[in-house]
Image (spheres, rainbow, N blue to C red):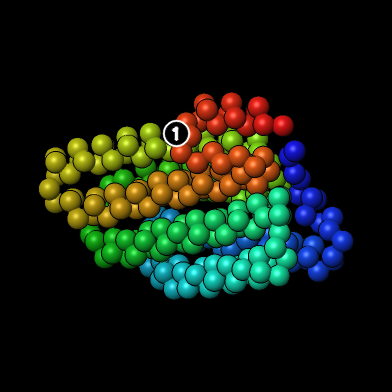
């Protein structure tokens, strides 16, 4: 049976209800921070804002601290409440999600560090159009994945899963274009390599957003769809009552 966002507020123990709600609330707070980190890192690059890039780099500690806090809360719930069924899936999904969010924070920090190195370079930086386009795509995936988690929305989660392949195609196309440009102008190698690392970080953000969406399906449907082809995932989700 599918669960809804209200399922975890129907326990006899009010304290248990509160603990589960706090897990979801803190996860969404971490997700909001990470989403802002990615947005600021890309903005720092596109606007050549070294101060903002430094802020993103320094704020990575806040992301790490939130992961530790939420993990500790999950550990206490597991130890004290010994949750079962959908409650256990919620706790496990939160633990997995915080790991992916922390890694997205790491990718945002990488983008910021590369933005700082590019701020010192002279001349036009090639590949910013590709960065802007892919960043908008993966940020939407991340935003939709977090919304799906908050609403227990498997349809929205599946949209995110399907979008991941499109991001991979865009990333591959951008990398081929930049490789060609480097071969034509060896003077651009250093700056283009930095852009490639940034594009790789953004592609990884998309991968982690995809993981978050998969956890929503696991949470609501009880299906582990990791490592499954998109067409197989849709079939599994539709069949599961």
Q: How many other residues sit within 10 Å of disc 1, few (<14), some (14-19) or many (≥20)?
A: some
Q: Quadrant of the C terminus?
A: top right
Image position of 171 with respect to 13: above or below: above
Q: Residue at x 59, y 36 (%)?
A: 158
Please say whether residue 51 is visible from this viewpoint. no
Front residue of 44/85: it is: 85
130 or 109: nearer the eye?
109
Please, which residue is most extreme toward the right here?
12
Task: Give x and y (percent) for residue 51.
Answer: 42, 71
Q: Position of residue 161 (x, y in %)?
A: 53, 37
Query: Which residue is disc 1 drawn over?
Result: 166
Relative to the observer, which residue lies in front, 101 or 138?
101
- In the depicted structure, whether residue 48 falls above or below residue 179: below
Quarter assignment of residue 45? bottom left
Q: Is residue 64 above or below residue 209?
A: below
Number of marks in picture: 1
**Which residue is drawn at the image coordinates 56% and 55% (left, top)?**
97
* Residue under the image location 73 percent in, 65 percent down: 81
């Amino acid at each position: 049976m599918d669960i809804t966002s209200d399922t975890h507020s129907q326990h006899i123990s009010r304290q248990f209800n509160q603990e589960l709600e706090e897990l979801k609330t803190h996860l969404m707070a971490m997700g909001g921070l990470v989403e802002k980190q990615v947005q600021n890192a890309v903005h720092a690059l596109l606007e050549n804002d070294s101060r903002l890039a430094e802020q993103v780099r320094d704020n990575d500690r806040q992301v790490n601290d939130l992961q530790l806090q939420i993990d500790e809360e999950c550990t206490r719930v597991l130890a004290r409440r010994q949750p079962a069924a959908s409650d256990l899936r919620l706790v496990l999904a939160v633990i997995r999600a915080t790991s992916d969010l922390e890694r997205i924070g790491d990718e945002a920090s990488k983008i910021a560090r590369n933005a700082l190195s590019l701020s010192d370079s002279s001349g036009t930086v090639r590949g910013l159009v590709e960065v802007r386009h892919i960043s908008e795509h993966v940020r939407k995936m991340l935003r939709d994945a977090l919304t799906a988690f908050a609403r227990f929305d498997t349809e929205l989660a599946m949209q995110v899963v399907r979008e991941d392949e499109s991001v991979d195609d865009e990333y591959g196309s951008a990398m081929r274009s930049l490789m060609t440009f480097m071969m034509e102008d060896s003077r651009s190698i250093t700056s283009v390599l930095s852009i490639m690392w940034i594009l790789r970080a953004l592609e990884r953000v998309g991968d982690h957003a995809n993981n978050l969406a998969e956890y929503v399906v696991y949470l609501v449907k009880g299906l582990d769809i990791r490592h499954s082809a998109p067409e197989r995932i849709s079939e599994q989700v539709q069949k599961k009552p």
